[in-house]
Amino acid sequence: MEGFRPELNQKDKYGNLIEDREYNDRDFDRTLFLEKRTETVAKYVSDYLKAHNKRMAKTIFFCVNQEHAAFMRQALVNENADMVKINNKYVMQITSDNEEGKNQIENFCNKNSSYPVLVTTSKLLSTGVDTKTVEFIVIDSNINSIIEFKQIIGRGTRLVEEKNKLYFTIIDFRNVTRLFADNAFDGEPLQSEEYNITKKNKEYDFCNEYVNTVETAEKEEKKGTLLPPVTNEPKKYYVDNVEVSVLKDLVKYLDYNGKLITESFKDYTRKNIKNKYATLDNFLQAWNSAEKKSIIIDEMEKAGIFIEELKANTKRDLDPFDMLCHIAYDKPPLTKKERIANVKKRNYFAKYGAKVQEVINALLDKYAETDIINLETIDILKLEPVNKIGSPMYILNRIFKGRKNFENIIKELENEIYAA
């Protein structure tokens, strides 16, 4: 939202006459609170996470102050009621005035803990807390300091390869990412970004860092300034009847050196793929010989190829293999539905009997919903529709006569999926 000016004699929800002037980003959530603006931010991010299959991706919302963080938490609860029903810690407010939230900091930072997922804060998580698995940084606070900006995005820059976290995403509602272009941004690294990992616990480092962060945040948020003279005017206007919408949606990509990608996303992806695999034959050889396709996909992401973004920008239901071949080498793609139809048409698995074919068909149904990587994990046997056939132990031992046979047949299934 660019700005707001009240109508003549417009009052807020509590009956206070709103001062007639132009309100902008510097006012929002500080002197003027637009309820629907916060709701719009919460909806935008929630919809993005849903569309990108990232609802369990740890996300920090940086808000203007503690009150704004509380309102944002409630708006996120409303947008994600189904997830909150599963676990009431799905959305948490972690600010210095919220004991329940502060008690969840260790869980939020622990890469083996799923909850909390969406966290709202103001200053508390900007420094001194090692949030390795954070995938999304949402900025809805006015930040003009290069140092503070570096500290905030530092929450997302930790890579966790075993969790497949190879990049992070910033969603910016205040044009704070303009600071990437500031010459001072590439200066000396911040001292506060160094962490002492204790031998006792390598998952996260709180020690004195956590205590100091809490105390600093409490001092910053409580010290305030000189109080203005007492008047009949409120400190803040609360407006609940003004419609708010997103004016424009701009996507920018930064490479591994933190430089803005100025070419088209498609050209950038093509160049990076060809840097790694110069020809289609090179790529096909690597893809077909890989023990697992996930190895190739991980290597691609390490090379700066955004697989998830490719999926989001692809209109058709394509496998990563087809997306990569089409973008880099102009190979006509097949949809997953077409690949599945080809597998069934060749009837390759008839030699294994009816029960194995039943499992194969269920796995193909799951592949259609998700991706090839899911076929390579034993956990897929726990998911519908495969689990309707029997327990993982039953499928492995009774139907496939052992895990090794199962893995061999999965390899054959992959070969059939990608057969010319």
Image (tube, rainbow, N blue to C red):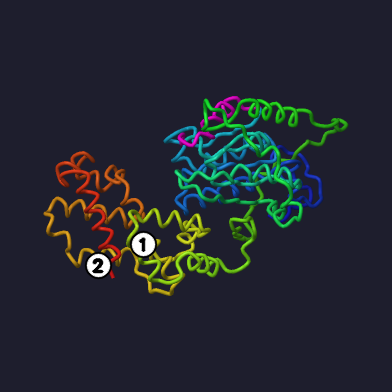
Seen in the picture, residue 272 relative to 85 is either above or below; the reply is below
Residue 131 within the segment the image draws in magenta: no
The residue to which callout 1 is attached is 287
61, 226: nearer the viewer:
61
Looking at the image, residue 242 sits to the left or right of residue 300; the answer is right
Q: Which residue lies at the image location 33% right of the left edge and 54% below the top edge?
A: 291
Looking at the image, tell me whether mark 1 or mark 2 is earlier in sequence order: 1
Looking at the image, residue 392 sits to the left or right of residue 156; the answer is left
Picture quadrant of residue 381: top left
The residue to which callout 2 is attached is 342
Looking at the image, residue 388 sits to the left or right of residue 179; the answer is left
Image: magenta residue range: 97-114
Helix, strand or loop at label 1? It is: helix
State the CA–CA distance, disc 1 to disc 2.
Answer: 19 Å
Tell me the crowding category of disc 2: few under 14, some 14 to 19, or many 20 or more residues within 10 angstroms, Cα based.
Answer: some
x and y, in percent, of residue 413 in the image: 25, 58
Query: Tag count in the figure?
Result: 2
Q: Which amino acid does label 1 sit on?
A: Trp
Q: Which residue lies at the image location 52% right of the left edge and 25% below the top edge?
A: 200
Quarter of the image with the C terminus in it: bottom left
x and y, in percent, of residue 180 in the image: 69, 54
Helix, strand or loop at label 2? It is: helix
